[in-house]
Amino acid sequence: MGDSSDDQDATFIKPPDTLTTKVRMGSGGVDMATLEKAEAMIANLQGDYLEWAAEDLANLDQALAHYMSNPEDVAAANAEVFRVAHDMKGQGGSFGYGLVTEVGDRLCRLLDSIKGPPTEAQAKALTLHLEAMRIIFAQRMEGDGGSAGQALVAGLEQVVRKLSSRDPETRA
């Protein structure tokens, strides 16, 4: 017997990413004027975010170079790359760059999967994630980046899948 749900098309609903959906309103919550002020402040920081992101990219590049040069303490070097990527991941969606959040998350999961110094293939995968973030900012790929953003994510996914099939220790 077939399941009737197999015959129906899936419907995807993308929730709005506004503060009003994230805070409680009314008694004991936030009033509308305060919420509007907070949203305006975030919007005004958008330009600053791009400057911060450029600094974060430089820090990520430096941390990756340190990590891949076989430092004495690879765990600390991995943790530094993870910290910068995690910060970028957290800020991306707040400033309209959801694709940065997605790529940052994938980079963090890849870093979690690497034990010890990265192999040559792992180092290439890490570098591709950094390059993906550079592309996102260079092309101002806001939101999910549209079809180009999804192609970028699909390419990273394919690289990590290939890496995982080569190295059973890498599961990202």
Image: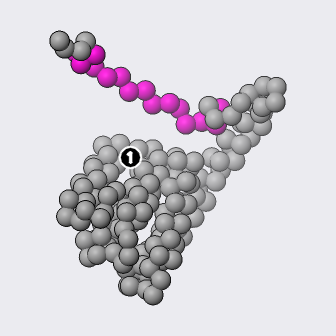
Q: Is residue 96 left or right of residue 124?
A: right
Q: Main secondary structure of the magenta part?
A: loop
| The magenta stretch spans residue 12 | yes
Rendered view: 135 above or below 127: above
Instruction: Identify whether 11 is placed above or below 102.
Output: above
Q: Amino acid at mark 1?
A: Gly
User: Residue tagged by mark 1?
Assistant: 145
Q: Secondary structure under badge 1?
A: loop
Compared to 48, does 124 lie above or below? below
Image position of 54 (left or right of 99): right
Q: How packed is label 1: few (under 14 Cα within 10 Å), some, or many (20 or more)?
A: some
Quadrant placement of the N terminus? top left
| Residue 96 seen in this snapshot | yes
**Residue 8, horizontal then vertical, whole percent:** 27, 16
Q: Position of residue 35 (x, y in %)?
A: 72, 36
- Name the residue located 20 percent from the left edge and 59 percent from the top edge: 165
- 93, 73: nearer the viewer: 73
Name the residue nearer the viewer: 140 or 28.
28
- Residue 30 is left or right of residue 60, and the answer is right
Q: Is residue 58 visible?
A: no
Q: Residue furthest left?
A: 1
- Magenta stretch containing residue 8, yes or no? yes
Q: Position of residue 31 (x, y in %)?
A: 78, 31
Q: Position of residue 170 (x, y in %)?
A: 30, 63
Q: Quadrant of residue 163?
A: bottom left
Q: Residue at x 52, y 52 (%)?
A: 92
Q: Is residue 79 above or below residue 73?
A: above
Q: Is residue 49 left or right of residue 171?
A: right
Residue at the spot 38% in from the left edge and 85% down from the top edge: 70
Residue segment shown in magenta: 5-20
Residue shown at 24% from the left, 55% from the top? 161
The quarter in which the C terminus is drawn is: bottom left
